[in-house]
Amino acid sequence: MLKELNPLLHSQLRLAVMSILLSVDEADFVYLKEQTNATAGNLSVQLDKLSEAGYIEVEKSFVGKKPRTVCRMTSTGREAMAEYVEALRGYLTGI
Amino acid sequence: MLKELNPLLHSQLRLAVMSILLSVDEADFVYLKEQTNATAGNLSVQLDKLSEAGYIEVEKSFVGKKPRTVCRMTSTGREAMAEYVEALRGYLTGI
DNA sequence: TAATGTAGTTTATCAAATAAACCAAATTTT
DNA sequence: AAAATTTGGTTTATTTGATAAACTACATTA
């Protein structure tokens, strides 16, 4: 039987962010915005959700006088991704 | 760069329906409802969307006095699924 | 004949995604 | 030096989408 697809991960933008953070170790707001073509507002909201779920760590600091938001995946996030992909495979057998 | 994920397919229930129809040649409403654990209302709405997009064919008939709704995937649907999966792979490299 | 089941559709509600508006500071232009 | 623009965001509002609840129509059973 088909498994639940974690709704927090089954969203294009959040999935894109998680995907990038899997491959990149850390990424800042500007980079994620470029890579995903998201608007700043949308990205801000989705990063909050991933952060509240404990899937990513968000670190806000200043570089000179400019704010800088850096994101990293947590081990919880990595596990959630693994499960999500596993569930997804169920939908894709035979392709 | 990450590709767009066809929003019509990037939905748990519609993806489940498409996935089933890829493997099964044809399926009726009741079967799809059982397999997906969807409510009838939700399934009805989502089948309409897939049908309007031309991704599935929906055939309504009567067996005796009972209505029967049978669904089949179209070649357009098959192509859309192939593209969707292809795009999705982009998000999953490194997993 | 009243209740219950089957096979759905339609409408209403709730949640999620996105866009628009805004903020604060820095930089550039005139 | 004042005004406009850019950078790096957040907050709020709007639009869209998913789901649930209510309903229809007919059949069956108690």
Image: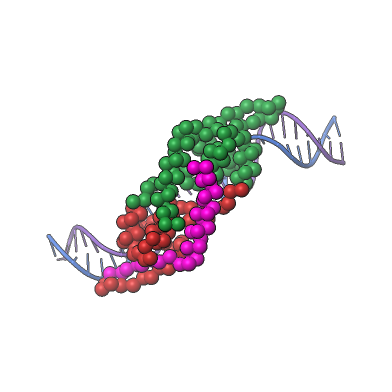
Chain colours: A green, B red, C purple, D blue
Give how far across and how far down residue B80 sits, in percent: 51, 60
Tell me if residue A14 can be seen: no
Give how far across and how far down residue C16 sits, in percent: 48, 45
Residue at image point 48% right, 56% down: B9
Q: Quadrant of residue A69?
A: top right
As drawn, is C1 to the left or to the right of B39? Answer: left
Residue at image point 35% right, 67% down: B69
Q: Nearer the viewer, residue A83 or A63?
A: A83
Residue at image point 42% right, 59% down: B18
Give how far across and how far down residue C27 sits, in percent: 78, 33
Q: Nearer the viewer, residue B67 or B33?
A: B33
Q: Nearer the viewer, residue C10 or B1?
A: B1
Residue at image point 64% right, 39% down: A31
**Residue A31 part of the magenta-drawn span:** no
Magenta highlight range:
B66-95
Dividing the image into 4 quarters, which one contains the C terminus of chain A? bottom left
**Where A52 falls versus C6 (above or below)?**
above
**Tally of numbered discs:** 0
As drawn, is A92 to the left or to the right of A69? Answer: left
Examine the residues drawn in magenta and state their main secondary structure: helix
**Residue B84 part of the magenta-drawn span:** yes
Give how far across and how far down residue C11 sits, in percent: 41, 59
Tell me if residue B80 can be seen: yes
**Where A81 falls versus D26 (above or below)?**
above
As drawn, is A41 to the left or to the right of A15? Answer: right
